[in-house]
Image (cartoon, rainbow, N blue to C red):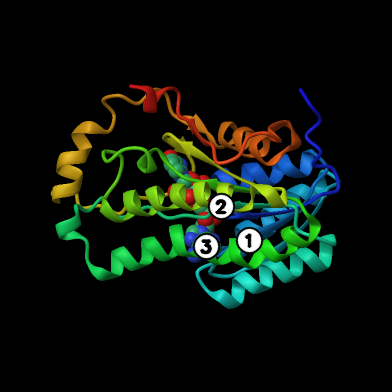
Amino acid sequence: MVSTGLAGRGVVVTGAASGIGRAAALKFAREGAKVLVADLSREGAEETVKEIETAGGVALAVVGDLSDQRVVDQVVERAVEAFGGLDVLVNNAGIMDRMSALGETDDAEWERVIRINLTAPFLLTRAALPHMLAAGRGSLVFTGSEAGLRGSAAGAAYTASKHGVIGLVKNLAVMYRKQGIRANLVAPGPTVTSIKVDADPEAHGPAVIGQLIGANIGRLGSAEEQADAIVFLASDAAAFVNGAVLPVDDGWSAV
Ligand SMILES: NC(=O)c1ccc[n+]([C@@H]2O[C@H](COP(=O)([O-])OP(=O)(O)OC[C@H]3O[C@@H](n4cnc5c(N)ncnc54)[C@H](O)[C@@H]3O)[C@@H](O)[C@H]2O)c1
């Protein structure tokens, strides 16, 4: 395989206190990248940083809610200041919905899920772009979901948010390819992490979708398997890959 070209690069991974984000942060660090861990959870973020430092890597944490513009600005400023630039941004932080059908989705569920899964990646990418444009290079990787490929993997809000993020990735790929910036997305199938669904099993969403989920999925994936795909897409090994949606799902999306 081509060298990843990640050694010495500045990388931001959101949601890196846990699950897929943490596994990606650790893998970037093993490739020699300097990693900013951005997450709501101080304890988890500090644990990821400690693990990277113990292995001889370079990392720092910014703790806060990424749907807040001030936190977003802080993430980008700290990365540029500490690493001398921002080469890779992984928009990975996300939350599940309550598996509600649209008619049962209240404003709070809709706004929370769209804000964190779709608006936060928009805000962070917008803040990172000037630095990538100035450098003439950059790699944006998003964590989507099987729910961005089909209508039978989650509730209305999560499904809409993950379809939305695919739109962002494709538009970024077209708009910025001449400036050396690539945007790609991994679409994980069910993966063992700390993500939680807080659904009422009697509600319309779970009652309908619950019968579909499970029917066609393969085995459960690990966070490391998702991280492998994220690091590949971010790296020079994927230099000609732009605007791609990569299912990492044991073939679920192929069924
Ligand atoms: N686990 C799965 O089966 C699965 C499947 C498809 C897609 N995904 C996607 O993978 C991504 C990572 O999820 P995971 O499964 O590793 O879950 P996880 O809960 O283990 O990790 C998500 C992290 O994001 C952080 N986070 C959530 N909201 C935040 C906010 N507003 N600001 C800052 N940090 C915030 C959490 O604190 C947590 O550390 C998500 O985008 C999720 O939608 C997961």
Residue at x-position 68% and y-position 49%: 178
Q: In the displayed structure, does residue 130 sit left or right of residue 114?
A: right
Mark 2: few, some, or many residues within 10 Å (few <14, many ≥20)? some
Residue placed furthest toward the bottom:
70
Q: In the displayed structure, does residue 240 sit left or right of residue 121?
A: right
Q: Earlier in the sequence, mark 2 or mark 1?
A: 1
In the image, 39 versus 78, the foreground residue is: 78
Residue under numbered circle 1: 38
Residue 10 in picture, x, y percent from top left: 78, 54
Residue 34 in picture, x, y percent from top left: 80, 52
Q: Earlier in the sequence, mark 3 or mark 2?
A: 3
Mark 1: few, some, or many residues within 10 Å (few <14, many ≥20)? many
Q: Point out the image quarter for the C terminus.
A: top left
Q: Amino acid at mark 3?
A: Phe
Residue under numbered circle 2: 172
Please identify, in this view, whether the residue under mark 1 or under mark 3 is nearer the observer: 3
Instruction: Give the quarter of the image for residue 224.
Output: top right
